[in-house]
Image (spheres, rainbow, N blue to C red):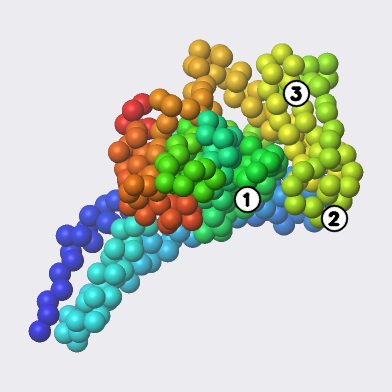
Amino acid sequence: MIELDISDQLAALRSTFADIRSVVGVDRLEAEIADLSEQAGAPDLWDDTDKAQKVTSALSHRQAELAKIVSIGSRLDDIEIMVELANEESDESAAADVHTELASIQKLLGELEVQTLLDGEYDDRPAVITIRAGAGGVDAADFADMLMRMYLRWAEKHKYTATVMDVSYAEEAGIKSATFEIDAPYAFGTLSVEAGTHRLVRMSPFGAAGKRQTSFAAVEVIPLMPETEVIDIPEGDIRVDVFRSSGPGGQSVNTTDSAVRLTHIPTGTVVSMQNEKSQIQNRAAALRVLQSRLLILQKEQEAAVKKDLAGVITASWGDQMRSYVLAPYQMVKDLRTEYEEGNPSKVFDGDIDSFIAAGIKWRKRDK
């Protein structure tokens, strides 16, 4: 005979869930979905492709957010029925299922609770991530490539849209730099805690055998601004260079001068783009990222905050925010939050949610 009692745990979960519903604003969310659904149903929606994509993307994000909240509410109701059945039948297997479901709901509520901390001005925007190899030679270029794969795998696991915008390949291995966009609910707010210098310690596959190598890579995260918020840039302030795309080839790639590099002369800000097939498309994409970076710079100057969003990242000793150690022991540790994992392979495969959650909570406490 078993007597399963999870009433205290369930009461605590329901209290947390009620708080989350209140912060998220379910009524507001439903109103936004209704408005976006009406826009998405307009017969002339796809006359303007850019606008259509923004509307459908926003609708998809809001629907996913609401569906998660509705699902948790239903599962909290269902778990009470599961407890009753387990007790009536005195079924230990059913009781184990209850504890498994309870842990799953706790995990989902934890993720939603972290999202409620994302209340920054640009937190709900898509994120543009730029990774640059730092000190460490070939190992640093390889490390930059590993970090790029880590974030793309993270996006893939969450079924988020990731678009590689530009990659500059290193001569021997890895990449010099890469820029890619991740479009997801609260992408910038979530990923902005990843900005900073990352350090790798390992037995180098490129150097002398038996010697450990330390290398660095810089991660910059900025929000991608909607076109209504971008700033005007005088044509005379921009230098435009066109060149042939590098790296793996494909149709219309490596055969024409379609890649574009924009340099904002007053600030020295440089943006390259080569993922599109035409020079016109690459220039438009590069201009939007450049405008986003300049808008952030303008906001920082107005607030007298030195790189508050993107951060000053030197990618060298004394500046690292996270260490990935593969030798002589295995560990990934965030030096700000003290959170650590003992399986670097899992982390490099995109399992970074715990690091992100710890970073968001740390940032909120720090503020």
Residue type at mark 1 is Ala
Determine whether, in the image, residue 91 is placed left or right of residue 17.
left
Of the two numbered discs 2 and 1 on the same chain, state the one appearing first in sequence: 1
Residue type at mark 2 is Gln
Report the disc number at residue 263. Answer: 3
Q: How far across and down, in percent of the image, does residue 17 sit?
A: 33, 53
Residue furthest to the left in view is 1
Q: How far across and down, in percent of the image, does residue 351 sit?
A: 44, 54
Q: Residues within 10 Å of mark 3 (few under 14, many from 20)?
A: many
Determine whether, in the image, residue 233 is placed left or right of residue 11.
right
Front residue of 323 and 288:
323
Asked if the residue under mark 3 is in contact with the one under mark 2, i.e. CB atoms within 8 Å, the reply is no
Q: Residues within 10 Å of mark 2 (few under 14, many from 20)?
A: few
Residue drawn 64% across and 24% down?
A: 295
Report the disc number at residue 162. Answer: 1
Residue drawn 50% across and 12% down?
A: 304
| Quadrant showing the N terminus | bottom left
Residue drawn 79% across and 46% down?
A: 276
Q: How far across and down, in percent of the image, does residue 54 sit?
A: 69, 46
Front residue of 218 and 300:
218
- Residue 309 visible (yes or no): no
In this rendering, the answer to whether 94 lies above or below 134 is below
Kindly report which numbered mark, 2 or 1, lies closer to the viewer in this rendering.
Answer: 2
| Quadrant showing the C terminus | top left
In this rendering, the answer to whether 71 lies above or below 129 is below
Front residue of 17 and 174:
174
Where disc 2 sits, the SS reads loop
Report the disc number at residue 251. Answer: 2
Residue drawn 67% across and 53% down?
A: 56
Asked if the residue under mark 3 is in contact with the one under mark 1, i.e. CB atoms within 8 Å, the reply is no
